Image (cartoon, rainbow, N blue to C red):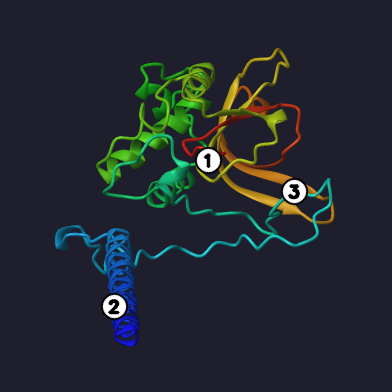
Amino acid sequence: MTAKRHSGKRRRRIFRIKMICTVTAFLLVLAMTVALILYRNESFDTVTQLPDEDLPSSSDTQTEIPDTDEPEAEDSVTDNQPVYPPSEPVYEPLFGEEYSTFRLPRKTVEYEFVETLMEIAFNEPVEAEDKKGVTKYGAYFGTPKYEWCTEFVIWCIVQAQEKLGLQYTDVNYPFSDWSGGCVSWYRSKGLFFKRSSGYVPRRGDMIFFDYDYDGSTDHTGLVYGVEYDAQEDKIYILTIEGNLPEDYPVGSIKQRRLACDWKKIYGYGTFMFIE
């Protein structure tokens, strides 16, 4: 009798152990299944599915960027050597909306506009004044005999935008017939850089001068490139300008190569934001 009682207790104990093991195994399987489902849902959420109309086309992703002459930076740069010094004039494509404070019209790119602007400026006659001292640049602003350095630059900008059928003046460039007005416009947009700031201008920037050393600008030009002289360890600014003060009383259009630290350089205005 006693042996039968002990045998019954043992069977009940074994049954309880089997039940506990079965429930534990079931709970483990359930927990693993839930964890797997959550992991899959989280992974799926991280994948952004674009609708068909938003997918970029092959033409959008294969924009051809012109080659530049700017070499890569060297690993060793001395304190007095500029970063990324170009060995030849820089004709820099100005791609990238992340650098632009004002978004340019999407029908074109900055590079196309700047190259159109340069083509117009360089095709203008050297002797721009007639025998009476009249220029078409001054006449465009209603002052045919007025000092026309700024008018020359703005006139070229207007011709470029009209050729492309787009609006750039008062959007990416100032529209003013005097250098002080242009500087004020660039300052209001946070796009004016004084010579002392160390800013190196880009192709298409406007350059301003202070010939009187009175702390204000009195002459305007257009930057068409930047040149680094390794022997002199110096950056030179390549410009095209009209009605230079040195040419008074008969103005003309000339190209110049100016040291970046020339004291008569007042500063630069750019439509490309530089961090």
Kind of element beneath mark 3: loop
Where is residue 23, by image quadrant? bottom left
Q: Which mark is residue 12?
A: 2
Alpha-carbon span between mark 1 and mark 3: 33 Å
Q: Residues within 10 Å of mark 2 (few under 14, many from 20)?
A: few
Residue 91: x %, y % from top left: 54, 54
Q: Residue at x 73, y 16 (%)?
A: 213
Q: Measured along the vertical axis of the image, is residue 142 above or below residue 196?
A: above
Instruction: Answer whether residue 79 is visible to the viewer in this image.
Output: yes
Q: Amino acid at mark 1?
A: Val
Marks 1 and 2 sit apart, C-alpha to C-alpha, by: 113 Å
Out of 173 and 145, give the one closest to the viewer. Answer: 173
Classify 10 Å Cα crowding around label 1: few (below 14), some (14-19), many (20 and above): few
Q: Is residue 158 above or below residue 211?
A: below
Contact, CB < 8 Å: mark 1 with mark 3?
no
Instruction: Work out how far the residue at label 3 is from the one at label 2, CA to CA, in angstroms.
Output: 88 Å
- The residue beneath circle 3 is 82
Q: Residue 255: which quarter of the image? A: top right
- The kind of residue on which mark 2 rests is Arg
Residue kind at label 3, given as amino acid type: Pro
Q: Mark 1 = which residue?
A: 126
Query: Percent position (x, y) of residue 264?
Result: 72, 26
Relative to residue 182, is residue 34 drawn left or right? left
